[in-house]
Amino acid sequence: MTAFSPQITHNCRDLEHLFNRCFASSENTVLRGGASEPLYAPARGDQPAVIAFTQNYFASALHEVAHWCVAGPQRRAQEDYGYWYAPDGRSADQQAEFERVEARPQALEWIFSRAAAWRFRVSADNLTQNLGPSRAFKLAVANQAIAICHNGLAPRARNFAEALLEYYRPERDRNWLLDEQHFRGESL
């Protein structure tokens, strides 16, 4: 888990404001909470694309933004990015596929969490099977985070991470954020 700062207030409305300030005009995409389930809906007509996150869960918002940042233009033209998703109760094979596609978004979520002084937890997202994240999955997430540190953030991810840093940790900079030592597997 990443270190977090309990004295900071984490309000999802602030995340919505930060995201929308960064991307409502440039990417025609907005972030909205209060959904019963997360969902990405592409832009339609004069309506912007919407990243809907679960209830008002801060971690859900960061996770859904991470998925949006990973998705390319063709994926962003499809509902839920055209991803396969099996709900809670996945088989071992389905869980392995979930972990294969989730490592990069969760690594990016970890970076966003660090920028926002929010505690990050790897999620296996398979509660009914009573499976926590496997050691291999945690390592895959850590390796992806380290790769991002080495290669740098893509433009949309960088814009959002910098907005989070400026709002939640103005004393820190991008070099601090992308210090790979903070993303070692043993810290998960």
Image (tube, helix red, strand yellow):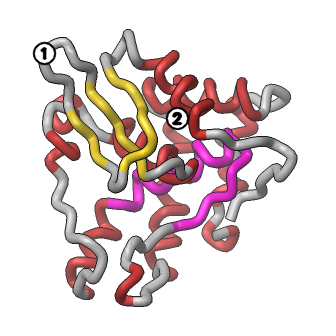
Residue at 52%, 35% in the rendered image = 152
SS category of the residue bearing label 2: loop
- Could you tell whether 157 is left or right of 129 in the image? right
Q: Residue at x 57, y 48 (%)?
A: 58
From this view, report whether residue 7 is shown above or below residue 37.
Answer: above
Residue 69 horizontal side relative to residue 172, left or right: left
Does 16 lie within the magenta span? no
Question: Is the residue under label 2 in contact with that under label 1 (CB below 8 Å)?
Answer: no
Q: How many marks?
A: 2
Q: Which-is-in-front pick, marks 1 and 2?
A: 1
Disc 1: which residue: 45
- The label shown at residue 6 is none
Q: x, y (%) of residue 111?
A: 59, 46
Q: Is residue 66 visible?
A: no
Q: Is residue 162 left or right of residue 135?
A: right
| Residue 172: x %, y % from top left | 79, 31
Q: Which numbered tag is attached to residue 152?
A: 2
User: Could you tell me residue 159's position as x and y percent?
Assistant: 53, 23
Q: Nearer the viewer, residue 103 or 48?
A: 48
SS under mark 1: loop
The quadrant in which the N terminus is found is: bottom right
| Dominant secondary structure of the residues highlighted in magenta in the image | helix
The residue range painted magenta reads: 102-122
Q: Is residue 108 magenta?
A: yes
Measured as percent of width and height from the top left, residue 3 is found at: 77, 57
Residues packed near mark 1 inside 10 Å, few (<14), some (14 to 19) or many (20 plus): few
Quadrant that contains the C terminus: bottom right
Amino acid, disc 1? Gly
Tell me the amino acid under the disc marked 2. Gly
Q: Quadrant of residue 91?
A: bottom left
